[in-house]
């Protein structure tokens, strides 16, 4: 594990984050990059060993975080205002050990006050790593 890299990434996130979509601290810390397509928010990210669990794979909580971020950013991009997660279910299909990885959030059903979304994570070999579904409340 490269502890110096972890320290540098943390310090860089502290110096460069802004409390807004795409640039908030966690996005900077995880090295997330965003792009948008029809009905989708694509998030790409490096798979850093300092975010591994003791078994030597990217931590499932970090994967859940990236999936949640992909769906939240899609809502803000498509609806024009933020929402918040009411519930989220994740399934982890295989360990993530190398990157870059990609994640795509998309709408299952877009509603006026409640929306249903899903997100998928793929590894560098384009193998499906995780799948999540969630229910979101649209912000006021």
Image (cartoon, rainbow, N blue to C red):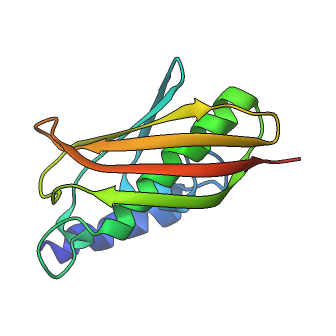
Q: Residue furthest top?
A: 38
In screen coordinates, is 93 left or right of 23? left
Figure check: 34 above or below 2: above
Q: Residue furthest right?
A: 140
**Residue 127 on image: x %, y %:** 15, 40
In screen coordinates, is 129 left or right of 20? left
Instruction: Give the residue displayed 16% in from the left and 56% down from the top.
Output: 94
Residue situated in front as seen by the camera: 80 or 118: 118
Residue situated in front as seen by the camera: 118 or 121: 118
Figure check: 109 above or below 97: above
In screen coordinates, is 116 left or right of 28? right
Quadrant for the N terminus, please: bottom left
Q: Is residue 28 visible?
A: no
Q: Residue furthest bottom?
A: 54
**Residue 52 on image: x %, y %:** 21, 71
Residue situated in front as seen by the camera: 119 or 12: 119
In screen coordinates, is 99 left or right of 138? left
Q: Is residue 67 visible?
A: yes
Instruction: Give the residue displayed 56% in from the left and 56% down from the top.
Output: 17
**Residue 125 on image: x %, y %:** 10, 37
Residue situated in front as seen by the camera: 21 or 132: 132
**Residue 23 on image: x %, y %:** 56, 48
Instruction: Give the residue displayed 74% in from the left and 30% down from the top.
Output: 79
């Amino acid at each position: 594990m490269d502890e110096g890299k972890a320290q540098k990434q943390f310090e860089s996130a502290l110096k460069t984050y802004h409390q807004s979509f795409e640039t908030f601290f966690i996005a900077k810390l995880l090295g997330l990059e965003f792009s948008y397509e029809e009905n989708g928010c694509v998030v790409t990210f490096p798979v850093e060993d300092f975010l591994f669990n003791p078994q030597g794979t990217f931590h499932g909580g970090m994967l859940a975080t990236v999936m949640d971020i992909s769906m939240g950013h899609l809502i803000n991009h498509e609806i024009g205002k933020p929402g918040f997660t009411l519930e989220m279910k994740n399934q982890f299909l295989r360990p993530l050990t190398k990157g870059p990885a990609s994640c795509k959030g998309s709408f299952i059903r877009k509603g006026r006050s409640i929306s249903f979304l899903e997100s998928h994570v793929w590894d560098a070999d384009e193998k499906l790593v995780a799948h999540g579904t969630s229910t979101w409340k649209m912000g006021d």
